[in-house]
Amino acid sequence: MTAPADFRAAAERGAAAIGVPFPLIQAGMGGVAGPALAAAVSDAGALGTVALYKSDAALAAALVDDTAARTDRTFSVNVIPEVADRLLDAQIAAVLDRADRRIAVNSYGLPPERTAAAVLAAGHRLIVQTGSSAEARIAAGLGAHAVVVQGVQAGGHHLGGQPLEELLADAAGVGVPVFAAGAVATGSDLLEAVRRGASGALCGTLFVAAAESAAHPDYKAALTAARAADTVVTERFSIGWPGRPHRVLRSPVTESAEPLPAALIAWTTVMGARRPVPRGSAAAPTAEAEGLVGEMARYAGLGCGAVTAVEPAAALVGRLRAEFAAALADGPAVDPVPAEPVPADPTPVER
């Protein structure tokens, strides 16, 4: 039987790998994860993340500067190679130029070898999110300080189609600390992930309703009222990011037997410009959105039932740290509080 000391040691390895006191990474949620949220999470002892998404070099530099001005702690920037495409090199160059401390670059999906090499050569940490054990091993081979395995329990876009518990079992022996993503929302959830071989967790849904999150108030309210059954995996929000199933809160868009008619349903601000949002856009509703916010992509994972109020990020991180410590003190006999089970068929509602 594994001793609590072993779980504690695993968590300490995870924290050391990402350069923070507690092995928790806030996900880089495009539009939602801005400098205010990233700084607040980092100040609380976890790894805050600012999302670059499709930012150009100037905006990427500004986001790094803004985050750095808000906290003296380490933080991370999230890049999405498959979405950024040709912008990726400019984003990385801007980040490396503006970083005033050792930070982390958190890549959603495997980054190009040149990107990984540039980050490591500059002395920063590299974190790679993956959807399979094979990808996790490739990421470790690229020099990643930590890899994230994302199960289908997670909200947002999916990198693979396996439940988290299978991924953790398959990721044994990757060689670097592994972080769990998918319905980790309490300290007991985190301990269960550590028992299964993780050294920490990456959480997105937990932080969408944070006070510092840039999510729209209606999105936050819907999330605090939701349970796991209120989420669904779909492909109906693919405009701007095709080819990735995503878990969202149910809405008329997901529940209609046939896709709803194409239409402009909202307006939002992207890189300082006011832009229309078509039905089916991958854009999440931010505080600047106006229109049919309930028909936009409100990403949420199976851990949403643990999100019951809009709270400061410091309170969220503090509670998870306290719960983890309490669960760890109980030793192997503690009963974890798992997220509601993954549906038997996580296939998207529409291909």
Image (tube, rainbow, N blue to C red):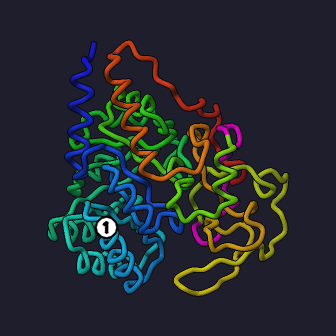
Picture coordinates of residue 144, whole percent (x, y): 24, 54
Residue at mark 1: 112
Q: Residue, x 35% and y 70% (percent of image)?
A: 67
Total marks drawn? Answer: 1
Picture coordinates of residue 75, whole percent (x, y): 30, 61
Q: Is residue 303 above or below residue 121?
A: above
Part of the protein shown in magenta: 227-241
Q: Residue, x 20% and y 31% (percent of image)?
A: 9
User: Residue 198 lies in what quarter of the image?
Assistant: top left
Q: Is residue 323 above or below residue 154?
A: above
Picture coordinates of residue 28, whole percent (x, y): 44, 60
Q: Is residue 260 above or below residue 221?
A: below
Which sits in the foreground, 302 or 256? Answer: 302
Which quadrant would the N terminus be assigned to in this image? top left
Q: Secondary structure at mark 1?
A: loop
User: Residue 286 lies in what quarter of the image?
Assistant: bottom right
Q: Residue, x 64% and y 46% (percent of image)?
A: 224
Which sits in the foreground, 180 or 99? Answer: 99
Picture coordinates of residue 140, whole percent (x, y): 24, 50
The residue carrying pointer 1 sits among few (fewer than 14), some (14 to 19) or many (20 or more) residues within 10 Å by Cα, namely few
Residue 217 included in the magenta stretch of the image: no
Report the amino acid beneath label 1. Answer: Pro
Which sits in the foreground, 347 or 281? Answer: 281
Residue 234 included in the magenta stretch of the image: yes
